[in-house]
Image (tube, rainbow, N blue to C red):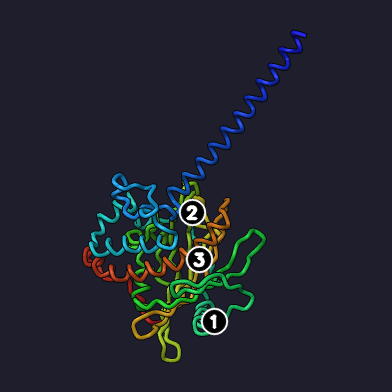
Amino acid sequence: MQGCRKKVLRYMGILTVMKLSVFAVSALSLLIALSWVLIYCPVGMVRNSAQMSKVNTHDPRNRMELSDYFDHYEEQLDEDLKRMKPAELDKKQKGQKTMEKKESSQEVEIPMQLYKDDAFEEMIRQLNKRDVKEYEFLAESMNVTIYRQPRGNAGLYHYKLYATLPDATPDQIAAVFLDNEYRVVWDNYVTELYPVQLNEKGPDVIYFNVDYPWPLTNRDYVYARETRKVIREGKEYIVIVMHSVKKHNVKEISGAIRVDDYHQSLALSLWNKRGTLAYIEYYDNPKGSIPSWLVNWAAKTGVPAFMKDLQRACAGLPGFLKDKGRPPVTIPVQ
């Protein structure tokens, strides 16, 4: 009887330890999830983070709703652009960032079939005539309409975006978008951006590192980028085509997942005398496990907000260039 009692007590002890272990793992998972939400989710963001120690964060009046998040970010961007001190912005937003050209010790293979004349002409055609057959409507916000089409069986999508940007011309948009050095100043999600190979003709090769919110790992890209300015039927267009490059000399780095299946194209034309009509195609396979709700949230909310930030960055470009003592990126008509 005594032996049976000891066995029962021992089994009970084992079960207790197992229950405690399961509870500890569950509690740790919940803590990680709550930490992510509190740090990165727009809901509950304090309006003035510089005064967090002085604000009662439990008071709902001091917290930011999801719909106000991007307005808050845009206000911060406006303030930074007004000050327009690039060195300070670099230190504040990015830490140590580089955009220096890296010497190539290995031949780079660019998928030139994707940069034929037809690819640029098709972007102009889609800009002038919306073609969304076999695409589903996703969202419309801030003068941006987004459509998507499933690609493969991994829950990935190919996106089409049609936008009107009333506060910047195509030349201004292109100058900001193509300026690697300026991009790391005004874009809060760019960790590193630099040319890998600059070519007199055809696409340049670019390295691009994007900051993903914790606990997700950063993604980085090596892609070819070609820009053309053309005139069709008396109207001027700027078209930018970008696609991932798989053979190159840029080694994978720790802390980032290399995206090797990526494509993005933009077509721009003058709209309403001082604005821009834009058409964008986009696809990438970010790899890893990214929640579908995060992808949808980024597409629906982050993309329109980025377009607004892009226009605001146009206003800050002259001050940045003056400080650097150099001219803007220009695109000759072909």
Vertical order, 90 against 227 (above or below): above
Badge 2 local density, few (<14 within 10 Å), some, or many (20+)?
some
Badge 3 local density, few (<14 within 10 Å), some, or many (20+)?
some
Percent of width and height locating residue 162:
49, 76
Percent of width and height locating residue 211:
43, 53
> Which residue shows up at 53% across the image and 57% down it?
294
> Which residue shows up at 37% across the image and 64% down it?
71
Instruction: Answer left or right for 114 relative to 321.
Output: right
Q: Which residue is mark 1?
A: 130
Vertical order, 98 against 20 (above or below): below
User: Residue 61 sits in which quadrant?
Assistant: bottom left
Judging from the image, what secondary structure is the residue with disc 3 in? helix
Nearest to viewer (mark 3 / mark 1): 3
In which quadrant will I find the N terminus? top right
**Residue 254 or 155: which is nearer the viewer?**
155
**What's the CA distance linking mark 1 and mark 2?**
31 Å
In which quadrant will I find the C terminus? bottom left
Percent of width and height locating residue 325:
22, 65
**Residue 19 or 299: which is nearer the viewer?**
19
Nearest to viewer (mark 1 / mark 2): 1
> Which residue shows up at 38% across the image and 59% down it?
194
Q: Amino acid at mark 2?
A: Arg
For the image shown, how many numbered marks are present on the structure? Answer: 3
Instruction: Answer left or right for 205 relative to 74.
Output: right
Vertical order, 242 against 38 (above or below): below
Q: Is there a contact, CB below 8 Å, between mark 2 and mark 3? A: no
Q: Earlier in the sequence, mark 2 or mark 3?
A: 2
Q: Which residue is mark 2?
A: 219
Residue furthest toward the top? 2
Q: Which residue is mark 3?
A: 300
Judging from the image, what secondary structure is the residue with disc 1 in? loop
**Residue 62 or 157: which is nearer the viewer?**
62
